[in-house]
Amino acid sequence: MDLQKIIDKKDWAAKYTIDEITYIIKNFEKRDPGSKGERQAAEYMAKVLEEDCGCDPELTQIESFKEHPGSFFGWIYFTITFVLISIAMYFVCPLVGVILIPIGLIIVLMQFGVYKKFVDWAFEEKTGTNITCVKKPTGEVKRRLVLNGHIDAAWEWPVNYALGGVGFESHAIICAVGAVFYIVVSALYLKNFGLLGIAVNGSLSYAVAPWFVKAAFWGLLFVPFEFGLYFMWNKKRIVDGANDNLTGCYMGIALLKALKDEGIELENTELVVVNCGSEEAGLRGSKAWAEAHKGEYQDVPTFFFSYDTIHDPKYLMVNYRDLNGTVKSDKDVSDLFLEAAQALDIPILKGWVPPLGGATDNAAFCQGGFRSTGITGLNHKLENYYHTRRDTYDNMNEEGIANCFAATVKALEMFDNGAKQ
């Protein structure tokens, strides 16, 4: 199949995408994970896919799942509280720091580092929404391409809004260093002065104190940063999420609409749009989808393209690793998109989602046993619109969207013609 005619519609696709995103933001409620707005947008997208894009209504699935969205940043209330208690108890019972701070770091690693449901039980339960819409080919299904984005929008990150990614990441790193610092000095204090420290053994003047005691006083400089992490997110302000990630949702929708408008039917390639909720709560939607569809999509070669934040054309990237660098994407799927963009001379990077970079739904699909890759269009060092009120429908990049659309169509063409199978 030659899809050059659809590739040439890339500027139309960008405008259509922006118009649709503008409509959603203006007409529906805020789309925080597990919210009414998330479901409204999901149902609207399913309707568009059925009525405007040729998807079979009988195959459409609007699926609900239970989640605890507040837990994703809820580690802060455990970890930072443990750190601050340990600092306060340093001269009274240093054993507190040796026990509590490592527990706090385990919580942040599990909840925020690898997105496990570690303290979800402690937070309010809500209901998220996923949609799956299917466009059947005219003949036998011999291959399948799944196009994915996430419907929900993030809670604002105030530090990123004020200082950008460098300030946001520096704040987090300083807090981590402070936590480890007090584990070390607490352990040394415990070793030298016993379980209860000098509270029992007598006073110790600063002048003759060991270096680790003096260092602990200087370590109090970490306290404002640790306390400030309580305000890492503003759960009362939900950003519009135009780029992150309605752009990802509309890669699949725009492609299917373009095919329908041009009257093009694929003979043996099935197209599926899977738009998930609650990615911003720790991939909860895509994890729920992967669990609900475990063992499915194994009948024919099935590739997943998971899009997230398609904005700057300089940073269009295939992510060969995801989830803070801990999850490997499928190489063939990754190579297919990379080669498709290169075939059209579209600037494309080969990269990864690094530590502190977070994750895309691609990670959940890979962990669930599906063949998937992640496509992003942003600087992983974090721009100041990322997770802030600047992520609006009037701050979108037509060229970035158009290039990603064109590369997607070319990848479909190559896949339909037998590439990487």
Image (tube, rainbow, N blue to C red):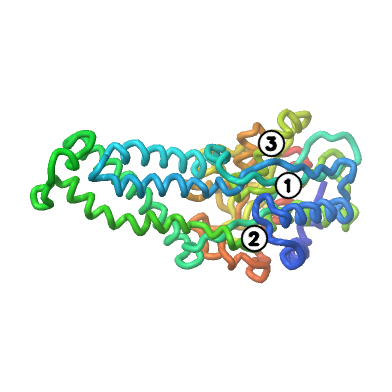
Q: Which mark is residue 290?
A: 3
Secondary structure category for the residue under label 2: loop
Rounded to the nearest angstrom, the CA distance separating label 1 from label 3 is 13 Å
- Of the two numbered discs 1 and 3 in the rendering, the one whose residue sits closer to the viewer: 1
Q: Earlier in the sequence, mark 3 or mark 2?
A: 2
Q: Earlier in the sequence, mark 2 or mark 1?
A: 1
Q: In the image as oriented, which residue stretches furthest toward the front?
A: 200
Horizontal placement of 328 versus 231: left or right? right
Q: Nearer the viewer, residue 234 or 11?
A: 234
Q: Nearer the viewer, residue 30 or 279?
A: 30
Label 2 environment density (alpha carbons within 10 Å; few <14, some 14–19, many ≥20) = many
Callout 1, which amino acid?
Thr
Rounded to the nearest angstrom, the CA distance separating label 2 from label 1 is 17 Å
Secondary structure category for the residue under label 1: strand
Q: How many marks?
A: 3
Identify the residue shown where x is 15% and y is 47%.
211
Figure check: 421 above or below 154:
above
Identify the residue shown where x is 74% and y is 45%.
130
Horizontal placement of 255 versus 315: left or right? right
Figure check: 239 above or below 354:
below
**If the image is split into quadrants, where does the C terminus sit?**
top right
Mark 1 highlights which residue?
Answer: 129
Horizontal placement of 5 versus 103: left or right? right
Callout 2, which amino acid?
Gly
Identify the residue shown where x is 66% and y is 71%.
394
Q: Position of residue 169 (x, y in %)?
A: 43, 56
Q: Nearer the viewer, residue 193 or 188?
A: 193
Mark 2 highlights which residue?
Answer: 241
Label 1 environment density (alpha carbons within 10 Å; few <14, some 14–19, many ≥20) = many
